[in-house]
Amino acid sequence: EAASVSFLFAVSEWLEARATAKARRALGAIVSLRPDHANVINPNTGEIVIVPASSLQIGNIVSVRTGDKIPADGVIVDGSSAVDESSLTGEARPINKREGDTVAGGSINIGLTQLKIRTTTTVDDSAVSRLIRLVEEAQANRSPTEKLVDSFAKTYTPVVILLAGIMCTVPWFWGPEIGRYWTLNGLIIIVIACPCALTISTPVTYAAGLAAAAQRGIIVKGGSRLEALGSVKKVVFDKTGTLTEGKFTLIHLDTVGGKRSRTELLELLALMEAPSSHPLSATLVDAAKREGVGLPMNTTVSQHSILKGEGVTALVDDSRVYVGNERLFKRLGMYDELPASCKESATKWNKAGGTVGFCGIEGVGVIGVFCMSDAIRKDAKQVVAALLEEGFEVMMLTGDGDGAANAVGWEVGLSPENIHSQLLPEDKLHFIGSIKFGSVPNTCNPCSSKDLVLMCGDGVNDAPALAVSDVGVAMGEGAALAMEMSDVTLMDSNLTKLLFSIKMGGRVIRTIRENIVFSLVAKIIVVALTFFGKMTLLLAIAADVGVMLAVTLNGMKLLPAGSAIDVSTDQISIKRKTSGGRLSGAPMNGNHDLPDVV
């Protein structure tokens, strides 16, 4: 019997190590994505020099041959090829890249053509390095459930050992026969009461869930965030760059009162917007370039600053210039001075779903009005429909005007009462705080009922709301600050992966509950059999090992069957699928009822 005990424990340790190593390898494989070298092209001789990837500088030209990893984020300056980004985004199909396209560090050139890339980041700041840092942070974070289980084990284990010690010693005072009987029972209690199954099953479940999400390009910062995803009841979306693509098109540009020509207006807009990182700013700069308008020479720009939720301002040759939305110009008192025809045009564009802006000079007034449109993401309507069907409360927040907000909200399927417009960053923060009030859960109890708030955004102005929400989700194409403040990052900004994240969170919670209930019930049964004299030491060990392996394998079921991820697996509803595994709903064309550029 002693030999059997030693053998079974040795087998259980081997199987346990083998099972848990699979989950660690799945996460560890992501850390190996960072390239270790780069082929730098000497700008003077054209010679290729192999250097450590860590020594790359911004602006270096690197050669990426077929099968090579791209060492850092950059822009293709020569060549066109197919690039495999599955390690970063979970997108299984290669993406065709050509001159002028951006590429991410860690992706692989699998085409037949060499690519020459000008780096725009160092290796430490590349997409793959950010991914690795997020994964390492996820591995380090421990959830409240893990802490609860460990705390329980620290108290429970000494009590069981003390009880077993009393059972193995005190009954000997009543004779050898009684002593032997209770000593055997005491040993059985020590074996079966071991909390190994509880303590190992929870971290294995989290590791498997985190790895499954990471392999699809979804980085969750730890088990607590993964568990919180499964308890979300309210989902709040930002508009620009989240429900929409954040790629604007200038469709109207009118001068006001003949104060400036169209060319002068475009020059001033380009000067004001060039230092800004907002998608609207890039659109205005590109529009000036398309019309052959460059930045004016001998013009000085100083004191450039962002007016949160309103626009930008700067001194241009000692004149205070403003570019922003209606709220800004009403505050400045310039909007009321606009001609009635300009106000009517702005109102019309806004109701049609456009984003309307103005340009004005202090002491002169508004000199121009413009309108831009933004295409809705092709999967936005499907995602919103799936969330609403499953009983989630879905809302949209935006700083845009009522017209643009209602147009986008209506197109993705939101009701008017769930569309909130003209919000400053602090307004978004207070709104999230208000809908969280009164629904704070008991985060230490995995079986408790929770109604958490999820905020999904992409911009710097979303960072405060992402931080205050129960679960903050950032789009991978968005601002670095938003990703820093969020709990979950969708590396390729695919909204359907938000559905997968929520579903995975629910599966993790269910699995943990199954493991805890199964472990406790199994132990109670064995303890009861022990006191009825129906249990032997060998059977107790077999039961303990069996329970531990069962809960471990139950947690490992969350890992995907294979390493290759079919992109169609992301096109899912939370419970219901239609034919082909895609969401039901009409296809999106992403267009507003606005005229094309003439």
Image (cartoon, grey):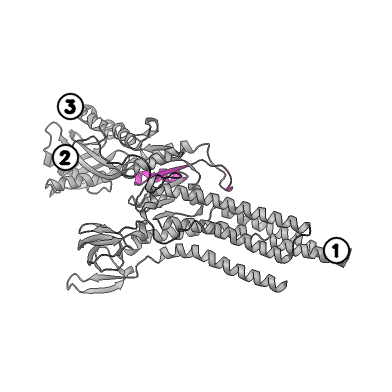
* Residue 569 appearing in the image: yes
Residue 341 is tagged as 3
Cβ atoms under marks 1 and 2 closer than 8 Å: no
Q: CA distance from mark 3 to mark 1?
A: 102 Å
Q: CA distance from mark 1 to mark 2?
A: 96 Å
Q: Identify the residue shown where x is 54% and y is 64%.
A: 19
Q: Closer to the camera: disc 3 or disc 2? A: 2
- Residue 58: x %, y % from top left: 27, 63
Task: Tell which circle, 3 or 1, labels the residue nearer the N-terminal end.
Answer: 1
Magenta highlight range? 443-470
Q: Amino acid at mark 3?
A: Ser
Q: Identify the residue shown where x is 31% and y is 66%.
A: 69
Q: Amino acid at mark 2?
A: Val
Identify the residue position indicated by label 1 in the image: 178
- Residue 330: x %, y % from top left: 27, 30
* Mark 3: secondary structure: helix
**In the rendered image, the vertical position of residue 456 relative to residue 154, given as above or below:** above
Identify the residue position indicated by label 2 in the image: 597
Q: Amino acid at mark 1?
A: Ile
Q: Closer to the camera: disc 1 or disc 2? A: 1
